[in-house]
Amino acid sequence: MILKIIFAAFSVACIFVQQLAALDTSLGGGSQDIVTWDKHSIMVRGQRVIFFSGEFHPFRLPAPGLWLDVFQKIKAMGFNGVSFYVNWALLEGKEGDFTAEGVFALEPFFEAAKTAGIYLLARPGPYINAEVSGGGFPGWLSRLPTGLRTRNSTYMDATQNYVSNIGGIIAKAQITNGGPVILVQPENEYSSGDPPFPDPVYFRAVEQQYRDAGIVVPFISNDNSPHGFFYDQGPPEWPIYGHDSYPMGFNDDISEWPVDALPTNYGDLHEEMAPNTPYSVIECQGGSWDPWGGYGYNKTAARQGPEYQRVFFKNFYSFGVTIFNIYMGVGGTNWGNMGYPEGYTSYDYGAPITEMRTVERENFSELKLQAMFLQSSPAYATAIPQNNTHANGSYTGNLNIATTAVLGNRTNFFVLRHADYTDTSTAKYHVTLPTSKGNITIPQLGGSLSLVGRDSKLHVTDYDVGGINLLYSTAEIFTWRNFGNHHILVVYGGPGETHELAIQGSGTTRIVEGPQNSVKFDKKQDSTIMQYTASDQRTIVELSNGLYIYLLDRYSAYNYWSIDLPSDTVSGNYTNTTTFLSTPIVKAGYLVRSIKVTDKTINLLGDFNSTTEIEIIGADNDISTLVVNNEPTEFQQDSHGVIKATVNFKGPDISLPVLSEISWKVLDTLPEIQKDYDDSRWMKASLSRSNNTERNLSTPMSLYASDYGFHSGYILYRTNFTSNGGESLHLETQGGSAYGHSVWLNDTFVGSFSGEITAYSWNQTFGLPAKKGQRYTITVLIDQMGYEENGSAGSSDMKTPRGILNYSLSGFKQSDLSWKMTGNLGGESYRDRIRGPLNEGGLFAERQGYHLPGAPISSWKNSNLGPMEGLREPGVAFYATTFKLDMPTGYDIPISLSFANNTDTTSSIRCQVYVNGYQFGKWIHNIGPQDIFPVPEGIWDYHGENYLAVSLWALEKGGGKVEKLDLVAGPVVQSSYPGRSK
Ligand code: GAL
């Protein structure tokens, strides 16, 4: 029913579309022919590209020197693409004042992508969602007297400056100008909203803004699930149709899998809705955000781990997906108040590449196996996915197994899984597959195949291994290579599983490594049939046609790497199947970044976390020099040409200051409660009406922080009154999930709300210890957790106000009180152009710039233990220290700030940490779950002086302290990545 309504709305929309098309024919990206597409895939310069991409947000890693490191790791994962959002709120904090400099500049990001050979899908919004404050909308948008994300000119005009600026920056980086950008997604999940939703006039207008800014590459859309909005039914200039998919949901219990969450009809829907566009999943769940009080990211990573990746991602391959973006591919940090209220500082997401840029999660390795297989299988790009309505029992006769076929001209792919994908038991099966030698029931050499619980496998038939026909394989292919007469095929299976392969041709076979009885051989169908049981002891079989087959188990396969090197031409194709399939395969450990063979010399760049035996498979026989990470390295080359060497890992000497032993300074950062505090320069709450359409005012003057230009971090209010004796004060405040507030009468603490995950606002009544005839100041401190997202078009959710919503003071009229307020220094006219509009809040120390290096801390009081000394009463203290770091070179060693989780559950404290001025952590000990805050090199100066500041807000009687705060180094990786600071 819902679908019907949507489709009805859509047909109306289509009429609009056609009319518009008649008016303007410039939308089609027609002015370029480098990136094209058909129903199978995109093509770059005529060459098919399976766009395997990981989402990576440069604004969540404000250390441009590390971007290349990340791109290289994505490349090493077998991916050739990255999708990135741009966060408008960080670039136009003040209306009309667009700036994208320093850590916000995108040019170094484009440069790094190009260097690594990564294509980019740009997703600049203006709306992005992305668990950022306001979904990327700058705070000043909350004053627009209109719904957001509609064709309304007030909204469209507000976006124009941003879109033309960011569009222009991205336009310069398009492949047509020698850059890496090949696709652009305007808007984000424009998939629900108020009528006239779905509004093609609006959607088209957003596209037109980008075309006007110079975007010529194809557009792509991301419906939040396959509704079919704006698909290729109208004129050809509509975007490639894409949708998102988050089947596991968010923040759910770890071990249980949701039922009925595996979409089995997406392939059919695609055929119905957008048959002429490549099947595209723009955001495929690759982890999950985690809310305040959530499970933590290691659990997220496990839940969306390798089992999930095998079952759910392979399901997408069964629909022939060729544009596939994992959200997130790379974790990041919600530094400097950029996050939305439901999320905490870490945005690690449980992604394959962690917030600390490590690649040790199994999610990374599993994805590498999958991506490498598809990149090695050009036939996949044009194979046709078959309807899978009758998948259960097909090909196997076993109703507990579902098989979906993706059939090519010659090569066929079969995706097998449990009919009930949540099944944790093992199913035994035989499978009958169509081959060029007729239908063959496998295994032919006895026994049976097995599918363990929560697993999915890809079987192939008539698969081209560089001119040799692999008639079938139930073992999964990692990759294959062609070196003249010498061919390599690497296959793997789950440990203990029986697999069977057939290589066409009748040559002889020889086991060159592994137990002689580890493989059963036979000849049938004019082919050599071989059966093995996957184990951690590999077997290498040599065939007389020059093919070496590496028979592995999955965990061993994780150690194999094969790097698709970027081509040398600036605007070349990054994925050149011909060269890719002739570069050597490397068996190593932690990470291989690149391998280059020139003039009998092999240059290998990789990262190591232990002493590692490496092998280079497929090198010429006359290699004279091996250089690993710029060090000439001894090696042997065996009679099969395989190079073997040992790379030694040497643990570094790391010495980090012990934070409880160094000297700290402290400042009371709540002088506002002191008698002589002068608030004459604060903003007077003088607006008797608000343009904020989300909520009517309950107070004579607006106290919405956004009405006064304060959009980030802590906000403060003050008002005065002369007491009639013992008043009670009622306050309703709002700050978003897990926020808190504290209230003082002069310098006397009267109460706090310490925060709850589900409390976005709070009503509280305080009895004031006020004496008749005396003049008092009420000071209110509120934690602003960021703005809500604006997921539904036309809504104004992001405007949900922050600050004081309502108040009453017994014996007074509301209008008897006049309020003043402050937030970050300058509000929208923020001062710190380096760290951007959101990094600071309204704490006194922040307003003075004391969180920045160079703060005059020598004049402050000494503090014995800094935040570990803490406060005996409610209040806010600001601790600061400086120390030198001298980290060993040649290693990648993340440094984090680790808070000991206080055992004292009665106190509640909120801390913010600032490293060299960047706010890199918001710790709320009574809510959690984050205790460890990674800070990247580049924010830390690894070879110089660092300034660390910690604010500590104690909300309850008795104050509070941090039990332990440490600098923690690791994991330690001996790295070949050279430049990373700044
Ligand atoms: C999607 C959205 C992303 C992100 C994701 C959840 O719906 O497009 O921006 O919010 O959900 O992490």
Image (cartoon, rainbow, N blue to C red):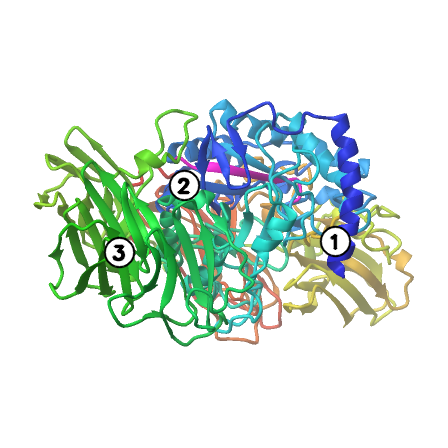
Residue contact at pointers 2 and 1, CB within 8 angstroms: no
Position of residue 884 relative to residue 392, above or below, is above
463 or 702: nearer the viewer: 463
Mark 3 packing: few (<14 Cα in 10 Å), some, or many (20+)? some
Earlier in the chain: of badge 2 and badge 1, it is: 2
Q: Residues within 10 Å of mark 2 (few under 14, many from 20)?
A: many
Residue 46 is left or right of residue 465, and the answer is right
Residue 172 image position (x, y, % from top left): 54, 25
Which amino acid is tagged 2?
Phe
Q: Which residue is mark 2?
A: 71
- Taking depth in this image into account, of 958 and 134 the one nearest to the observer is 134
Q: Nearer the viewer, residue 47 or 214?
A: 47
Task: State the extent of the magenta-drawn residues as a range.
Answer: 117-127
- 127 sits left or right of 81 in the view: right
Kindly report the secondary structure that dominates the magenta region of the rendered protein: strand
Say if the magenta span includes residue 659: no
- Whole-number angstrom distance, CA of label 1 to CA of label 3: 65 Å
**How far separated are the C-alphas under marks 2 and 1?**
35 Å
Residue 224 coordinates in the image, percent (x, y): 64, 52
Residues at marks 1 and 3 touching, judged by CB atoms closer than 8 Å: no
Label number found at residue 797: 1
Q: What distance separates the C-alpha of mark 2 from that of mark 3? A: 45 Å
User: In percent of the image, x 75 and y 51: which residue is there?
Assistant: 7
Label 2 SS:
helix
Q: Quadrant of the C terminus?
A: top left
Q: Is residue 975 visible?
A: no
Residue 525 circle label: 3
